[in-house]
Image (cartoon, rainbow, N blue to C red):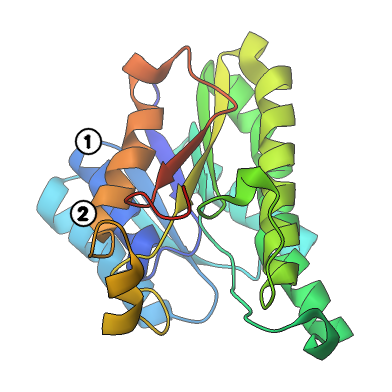
Amino acid sequence: MLKKALVTGSASGIGRAIGLDLATKGFDVAFHYNSSAEAANEASKEATTNYGVKSIALQADITKPEQAQSLIETTAEKLEGLSVVINNVGNYLEKSISQTSIEEWHQMLDSNLNSTFYVTQAAIPHLKAAGWGRIVNFAFASAQNVMAGEVETAYRVAKTGVIIYTKSLAKELIKDNITANIISPGVAENSVGLDETTISLLPSKRPATLKEISNAVVFFITPEADYITGQVLEVAGGMRL
């Protein structure tokens, strides 16, 4: 089994936790960043120093298809193959529809949905060449329920699109021994605007740790998940049930 992974948006937060978790499992890892070069290089160095794997930090603005393509090609070249792609990049916007600008609307689609498409489409030939593959994309808790939101419509539209896209990938690629699944986090320990009021409204009365979200991602990558594809796994502590 070829153990070569790319994690987008992995200079910090959830992406960094996933990248380091994969390193503990013996995966060579590419830590992707857009502007946080120092943090990405530190994460890459930690993976190599602590876990003895090959690790690199690569810059790209993956809202641009040509840069997403370059990221994939460089990853596959430097790591000598690619078998796992984790699409963790995605900005958040909390605004009503009427207050959302055209630029913000496009930015939500670009950072969440289009970037996932660009990276994955470029990666598929490499996953096929590896003989097996794992794609894990990110949505958010309850996105699969297609519920309206008063102040996050653009974000919801983009993440629902990620789910539909991933399910379509799953159906198409299972014959190639490639699975595609979705992680849908709720409130995490690094969530923007996290406060005691928000925590008190959660059934769990606490946010998810980064490790708990990473554990869910790693499960989809294990051999035990070979027959699981096109699925949404919420890591939300009962939020929005």
Using the image, tell me which numbered label, if any, was put on residue 92.
Answer: none
Above or below, 164 relative to 17:
above
Q: Which corner quadrant of the image does residue 159 belong to?
A: bottom right
Q: Give the x, y percent position of residue 195.
A: 31, 84
Above or below, 48 relative to 13: above
- Determine whether the residue tagged by mark 2 lies in a helix, strand or loop: helix
Q: Is residue 54 visible?
A: no
Foreground disc of the pair 1, 2 = 1
Q: Earlier in the sequence, mark 1 or mark 2?
A: 1
Percent x, y for residue 92?
59, 74
Q: Position of residue 181 (x, y in %)?
A: 54, 33
Look at 67% across and 78% down and name the residue there.
Answer: 151
Question: Is residue 84 something one can see in this rendering?
Answer: yes
Residue 177 is left or right of residue 42, and the answer is right
Q: Quadrant of residue 216?
A: top left
Q: Where, quadrant-wise, is the N terminus in this rendering? A: top left
Amino acid bearing label 2: Thr
User: How far across and down, in percent of the image, does residue 233 sit?
Assistant: 45, 37
User: With 163 as the anchor, is 33 left or right in this view?
Assistant: left
Q: Which residue is mark 2?
A: 48
Three-letter code, disc 1: Lys
* Of residues 8 and 136, the one drawn nearer to the viewer in this rendering: 136
Q: Residue at x 39, y 29 (%)?
A: 221
Residue 207 vs 174, above or below: the answer is: below
Q: CA distance from mark 1 to mark 2?
A: 12 Å
Label 1 packing within 10 angstroms: few (<14), some (14-19), many (20+): few
Q: Which residue is mark 1?
A: 25
Question: Do the residues under discs 1 and 2 have CB atoms within 8 angstroms?
Answer: no
